[in-house]
Image: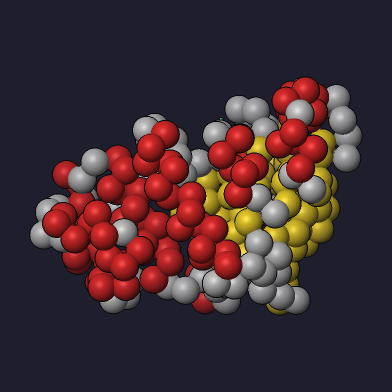
Amino acid sequence: MTLSLHELTVARGGQPVVREVSLYAGRGQVSVLLGPNGAGKTTLLEAVSGILPSRSGRITLDGHDLTGRPRTRRARLGLAHVEQSRAVFATLTTRENLLLAGDPDRALALFPELAPRLEVRAGLLSGGEQQMLVLARAILREPAALLLDEMSMGLAPAVVRRLLPVIRALADAGCAVLLVEQFAHAALALADTAYVLSRGALTYSGDPGPLRADDTALRRAYLGEDRA
Ligand SMILES: Nc1ncnc2c1ncn2[C@@H]1O[C@H](COP(=O)(O)OP(=O)(O)OP(=O)(O)O)[C@@H](O)[C@H]1O
């Protein structure tokens, strides 16, 4: 499945905060969306999954037009969104949280760390364990495309290093992953394609190589000095 945005514009409080953004997240690929705070990354993901309406432009998933469709319809077509809020059912156990999405054993194959925590209420898990749970729940639903918003926020670098290969493996299994990340270097190391958003518009699209190789290129894109 390919997730495709064509000249997507999204407004917040009457102001466009994502402006005519076109990007592709291909099947089997990790596409990374970087950019400074307030650039519009979360807004863009929320418009793609249907939390927010888009003002103009088009969103398609493998040719199916998602634009204007309700969130549930987008999810049924295979689009999953792991939000920044890292929402788990806090009063349910880890096992119960997993059962709502699929077979807990499959989740444990991805994250064996959760095995001793199965009977613990999800609200009592550490931040890293909660993120594993949230990711496992999304993966159990076998999404065609997965949007990940700041998965690593507030987590120790060692935990982030643990999560990123799982994302890579998910893409290798055929999922189209669109990853919003603060840890630019770690995300770029994983990426097949990179996009940089600055003040609502794309300033870089394509090969992550130049951004990996040269901090100046990344900084210029963040500052909006390179219009793609
Ligand atoms: N609920 C809201 N109402 C009005 N404006 C908002 C709202 N949420 C965010 N904004 C504004 O929209 C713009 C984009 O914010 P957004 O959260 O999408 O950026 P971001 O790139 O995800 O940043 P961050 O990395 O800080 O999460 C910002 O200028 C922000 O102030």
Residue 147: give x, y in percent of width and height. 56, 56
How is the structure coloured here?
secondary structure
Q: Left or right? Give the position of 56 relative to 33.
A: right
User: In front: 152, or 169?
Assistant: 169
Q: Left or right? Give the position of 73 relative to 225.
A: left
Residue drawn at x 57%, y 76% as measured from the top left:
77
**Numbered label tally:** 0
Residue drawn at x 65%, y 28% as measured from the top left:
36
Residue drawn at x 72%, y 25% as measured from the top left:
215
Residue 118: give x, y in percent of width and height. 16, 60
Query: Quadrant where the N terminus lies?
Result: bottom right
Query: Quadrant where the C terminus lies?
Result: top right
Q: Residue furthest right?
A: 227
- In the figure, 75 relative to 156: above or below? below
Q: Residue furthest front?
A: 213
User: In front: 163, or 133?
Assistant: 163
Residue drawn at x 38%, y 37% as measured from the top left:
158
Among the 4 quarters of the image, the one containing residue 97? bottom left
- In the figure, 202 relative to 219: above or below? below
Residue 43: give x, y in percent of width and height. 61, 43
Q: Left or right? Give the position of 46 relative to 205.
A: left
- Whether residue 52 is visible, yes or no, is no
User: In front: 14, or 152?
Assistant: 152
Residue 144: give x, y in percent of width and height. 57, 72
Q: Left or right? Give the position of 49 relative to 3.
A: left
